Amino acid sequence: MDNHTPKQFVLQLGSLVSLYLSLSFFLVLVFGFITILFPDPINGIWEVESAASSIRLGFAMVLVFLPTYLILTRIVNKGRRTSSSSYLGLTKWLIYLSLLIGGFVLLGDLVAVIMGFLEGELTARFILKAVAVFTVTGAAFYYYVLDARGYWIKHERQSLIYGIVAAGLITITLVAALLQIPDPAKVRAMKVDQEMVNTLQDMQWRIEDYYRTNKSLPADLPTLYGEFDVPTAPENKPAYVYEVTGDTTYKLCADFNYDIYDFGRGNTAPRVALAPGLRSNYNWDYKAGEWCFNRVIEEETKQ
């Protein structure tokens, strides 16, 4: 065993760690992509938002660790071809061990997919996710089983072609997934919308508390907030509007950037109807532009 073994070991370890991080988070991205392509109306918008978050996380991780893996693997393979031994025994053991550990980790993804199906996930999503797991893990295991046998050392050109094809398919998937979620500017605008909804919800709570104490609605927002500052809308948006419309009714208004169900780039998240008996006081659906939420003091608040 030559004196390059420690270096080869560290490079091989870094390569394999980068590989399994890339594969794991690529599957996270693919699962999010599939969820957005086949939305489940039962789960509503929260599932689409969660899937978009998964795509962003998967994209960031793959963007960092996939190039790292390709660079380290290239260095490792170059070192092997110029080494006195065609394949260092220590790194060979490391590959087999990593295949075992990585296999269990990625099989855990398959277990999660099956559990999702048993818990009522859409059949199309289950099939696509299962295919994704088998395809990704199968491609990785095929490469490294041959690698452990020294195949790629003797067939450098084929190894390069395999890597280029894999990287190309991954890149296409990354771009396709990104096209299904909002761009960064829209994400920020949607966060502004959500912040305004949170503020209006707090206003509603304060109004109900004010009514319980005073048996009447506050005349305006300065009266409601008293010694505290009245909240201002973020990023130079028009001011919040509070208007009394009756003895026990009022409305809260804000100017929103997007419809609440306007999600992605031209995509619309599935809209779920309110459950029977659910009061409108708890409905915070809105559309772009100035939108008002009509509210009524509930019976338990009046008492």
Image (tube, rainbow, N blue to C red):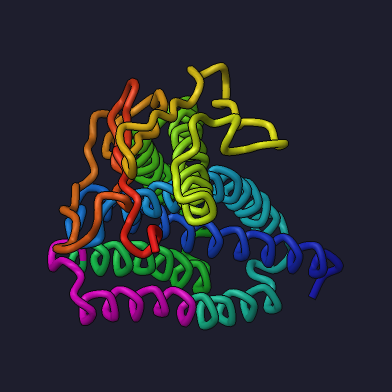
Q: x, y (%) of residue 161?
A: 40, 45
- Across and down, in percent, residue 174 comes to 39, 41
Indicate yes or no whether the magenta region holds residue 116.
yes
Q: Which residues fall within the magenta stretch?
A: 103-125
Q: Is residue 56 visible?
A: no
Whether 231 is among the magenta residues is no
Dividing the picture into quarters, in which one does residue 229 lie?
A: top right
| Total residue callouts | 0
For residue 142, what is the image quadrant?
bottom left
Q: Quadrant of the C terminus?
A: bottom left
Residue at the image position 42 percent from the left and 70 percent from the top: 141
- Looking at the image, the residue that sits furthest to the right is 3
Task: Give the left or right position of residue 98, taking residue 58 as reference.
Answer: right
Vertical position of residue 105 compared to residue 143: above or below: below
Magenta stretch prevailing secondary structure = helix
Residue under the image location 35 percent in, 37 percent down: 250
Q: Is residue 127 above or below residue 202?
A: below
Residue 302 screen position, x and y as percent: 38, 58
Query: In the image shown, does 140 or 203 lie closer to the viewer?
Result: 203
Q: Residue at x 21, y 48 (%)?
A: 37
